[in-house]
Amino acid sequence: SLRRFWASVEENGEMPAMFDGMKLAAVATVLYIIVRSLNLKSPTAAPDIIYQDTPLNLYLLKSCPILTKEYIPPLLWGKSGHLQTALYGKMGRVGSPHLCGLRMYLPMQDGATATFDLFEPLADHHTGGDITMVICPGIGNHSEKHYIRTFVGYSQSQGYRCAVLNHLGALPNIELTSPRMFTYGCTWEFAAMVGYIKRAFPQTHLIVVGFSLGGNIVCKFLGENQTNQDRVLCCVSVCQGYSALRAQETFLQWDQCRRLYNFLMADNMKKIILSHRGSLFGMSSSKMEDADLSRLYTATSLMQIDDNIMRKFHGHGTLKEYYEKESCLQYIHNVTVPLLLVNSSDDPLVHQSLLTIPRTLAEKKSNVVFALTLHGGHLGFFEGAVLFPQPLTWMDKVIVSYANAICQWDKRQSPCQEAQL
């Protein structure tokens, strides 16, 4: 009977038709997976802007049309937050410039040595003023990262001096001089850099910029003491998570592959810590023990590393205490200078529940503008036609455009203030 079935199939030509159907089904399945994974059906849109109707905010939105226009990511892959994040992490930026700057070393009271790189402007600022961007990079990052180089190069061309903090322990060729490295919210090194800039350039005004973890640090720094906001024109924070305590729970979930990102970031932190093993564990003043080193080897999440290593640098008794005291959440309300908070809805590292924090802040405080894009991933925000992204990203353009508008507003207000005096 089986023989007769195959003879009938061959005689009637049903087999090729069946195979064609299987091929079509396979192709349809692959296309469906591609469309879903690349999020191709998702629309492009202008950022969702939350702000209060103050004269300054209305002026800013009018002067920064990029904030109110449609953000269009690269057609084929730009609507995937995972690909935007992965390309930022691996490729950084396209054709990032080679910068010429001066590396500065600042001794700290506890024996640590903070470093930052200083880059002079390549053109006059459009206001004629002396403006310095003080920049805090993301976790384990420094001035040599591609996204930092691209942003600094663009800012220099627009007339800004740039000072970029190198997170303590992040530069592979700079040894630690004390048993301590950067943490989630320690502002000491950033404060030292800002203090140096204010002393070295007494006429300069500051634009404060923070990326990811750096966004937490700069917002915490400004809110810790009102004097920290002296000569600061504004602050821009991009892709920060606002509350480490709330974020830790979401970072253990597999939703949006967040647990995988957690593992990869923990692995990178582990490499940084182990590269400074002698300084962190070998010094007599170290708070670390051999048992902490053993736990570090087996750690598979940032929370385990934070609990066994990072919290001990500043003597926090528990992980909860560390996250509460190092987050900007309890300080950001004290920031009174104009504050632009930027996040992306498809950021795989920042859970949607955390975005209620900047939204509520912008609804309550008149100095805060919250911009939420539909796409962009984590520090991606690539722009481009179909496949290849442009060197400058939407993020780079937004920060400089916002800073330009703030500087212009300040210049307009200064004659009025002098007239009143």
Image (spheres, helix red, strand yellow):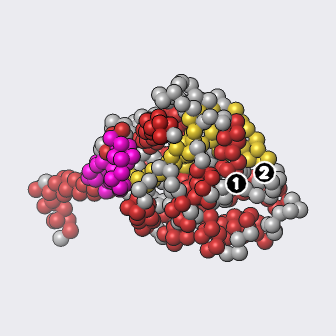
Residue 57 position, x and y percent, is: 37, 48
Residue 298 or 330: which is nearer the viewer?
330
Locate residue 245 relative to residue 390 in the image: left or right: right
Q: Residue at x 66, y 49 (%)?
A: 190
Measure how far apart labels 1 and 2 are at the Cα level: 8 Å
Locate residue 350 relative to residue 59 in the image: left or right: right
Highlighted range, magenta: 35-62
Question: Which residue reaches farthest front?
Answer: 421
In this rendering, the count of numbered labels is 2
Residue 361 or 243: which is nearer the viewer?
361
Instruction: Tell me, yes or no, if residue 1 can be seen here.
Output: yes
Marks 1 and 2 in Cβ contact (< 8 Å): yes
Q: SS class of the residue under badge 2?
A: loop
Q: Is residue 32 above or below residue 132?
A: below
Residue 392 position, x and y percent, is: 45, 35
Image quadrant containing the N terminus? bottom left
Q: Residue at x 81, y 66 (%)?
A: 287
Tag of residue 188: 1
Amino acid carrying mark 2 in the image: Met
Instruction: Give the quarter of the image for residue 351.
Output: bottom left
Tag of residue 108: 2
Q: Residue at x 33, y 53 (%)?
A: 53
Q: Residues within 10 Å of mark 1 (few under 14, many from 20)?
A: some
Residue 185 position, x and y percent, is: 63, 60
Amino acid carrying mark 1 in the image: Trp
Locate residue 148 relative to residue 11 in the image: left or right: right
Q: Residue at x 75, y 52 (%)?
A: 275
Q: SS class of the residue under badge 1?
A: helix
